[in-house]
Amino acid sequence: MPFTRPNPVQAHRITDLDWHKNRHHDRVCISIDAGSLARLMQNRQLHAEDFSCLDASSQSLVRNLLLACLRHS
């Protein structure tokens, strides 16, 4: 079955969600492209202390991205 795009009229909005009251939402597990991660780190929009790596391979990649950011600053 193909996935369809949601109808914007039927799309749910989460603008009323108060993140501070919902403490069970304090951690999010995501996967992000290494290039996007590097761009966020280079633009200082995301810092290495703001997240943790779940495996050694990811940790090594993040370490190398961080070092590359430091060399170019």
Image: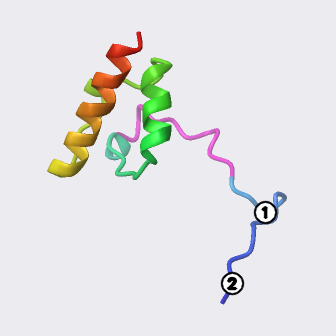
Which is nearer the eye, 54 or 61?
Answer: 61
Residue 30 pos. (x, y %): 39, 51
Magenta residues (range): 13-23
- Relative height, residue 17 to residue 44 (above, below): below
In the image, farthest residue toward the top: 73
Q: Residues within 10 Å of mark 2 (few under 14, many from 20)?
A: few
Q: Quadrant of residue 34?
A: top left
Q: Is residue 21 left or right of residue 10?
A: left
In the image, farthest residue toward the left: 56
The quadrant of the picture occupied by the N terminus is bottom right
Which is nearer the eye, 55 or 22?
Answer: 55
In the image, farthest residue toward the right: 9
Residue at horizontal 78 percent and vertical 62 percent from the top: 10
Which is nearer the eye, 36 or 7?
Answer: 36
Q: Residues within 10 Å of mark 1 (few under 14, many from 20)?
A: few
- Relative height, residue 19 to residue 55 (above, below): above
Residue topped by disc 1 = 10
The quadrant of the picture occupied by the C terminus is top left
Residue 63 pos. (x, y %): 23, 32
Which of label 2 and label 1 is nearer to you? 2
Q: Earlier in the sequence, mark 2 or mark 1?
A: 2
Which is nearer the eye, 16 or 58?
Answer: 58
Residue topped by disc 2 = 2
Give the overall secondary structure of the magenta segment.
Answer: loop
